[in-house]
Image (cartoon, rainbow, N blue to C red):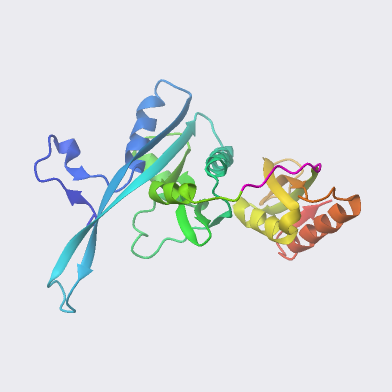
Amino acid sequence: DKEILEVANPISSFNKYLRPSLIPNLLRNVKENLKFFDEIKIFEIGKIFRKLKTQKSKVKNKNQNSKIEEKKMLGGVIAKKRMGDEGFYELKGIVDLLLNKLGISNVWYDDYQQTPEESHLEIWHPRKSAEIKTDGQELGFLGEIHPKILEELEIAEKVFVFDLNFQNLKKLASEEHEYQPISIHPAAVRDLAVLVPLGTKTVEVLNVINAAGGKLVRDVDLFDVYSGEGIPEGKENLAFHIIYQAEDRTLSAKEIDEVHQRIIKALEENPEWEVRK
């Protein structure tokens, strides 16, 4: 790849290039350790290096200088024998907890669309990946590794990875944060199940719930994904706990009902989604 930097005097052929990503070594560790363990959970913090092209002239292939991009990254991986899609949600929970402990708020998950120059990489599963953002900044990516890559590496199990920009995490975590005490007013939990087409990204549903619920929705947790008996073919059932809480008062049942109905109405604006009563 044109982005890869070659070492002038490598100590071995294996170390011929500077790594452009933490992911390949994480996958190599998964491959080796799944021989001996049923479950792998590992992470790494380290630098990556890429070659960037800076063009000084419009004349093709002339006066082009290489500029080196060096970044510190945080990568993590989960792999289990006979693991299904629950690995994605488990890893998302770990990322959510990490960002919460660092005091990084306003985090949301967006569809990841590869740019044309990235399309040849095919690192992520096309329907099971997300870009992690906060306040307009990109924090990294989360998703399942593309089956073709796992097949090439002879890894039989599904593998889920997060790839975060450590420098951005450090910057955001070091900024001043306003202390907000835990609310003394009780929270209320309502469950909600949505029937969606197979392959629908959970983040799409989460974004609608949070947007419609507003400030009174303190948290939303996915606790079940089901397709099979009793579910129409080509559909799956996503079940959520929605936690309602106000900072300044105890919410009445009427207030919670109004917000809950607003969320249901927003979800059902999508003709392919059905809230199960």
**Is 36 on the left-hand or right-hand side of 17?**
right
Give the magenta part as a residue range: 179-186
> Residue 116 location, x and y as percent?
37, 65
Is 199 covered by the magenta stretch? no
Residue drawn 53% across and 56% down? 134
Residue drawn 75% across and 63% down? 266
- Looking at the image, the residue that sits furthest to the left is 9
> Residue 161 location, x and y as percent?
45, 42
Whether residue 227 can be seen here = no
Question: What secondary structure predominates along the stretch shown in magenta?
Answer: loop
Q: Of residues 25 and 154, which is closer to you in this image?
A: 25
Whether residue 34 can be seen here = yes
Query: Based on the displayed image, in which of its 4 quarters is residue 22 positioned?
Result: top left
> Residue 111 location, x and y as percent?
53, 58
Give the vertical position of 149 relative to 201 (above or below). Answer: above
**Is 21 on the left-hand or right-hand side of 162?**
left
Is 182 covered by the magenta stretch? yes
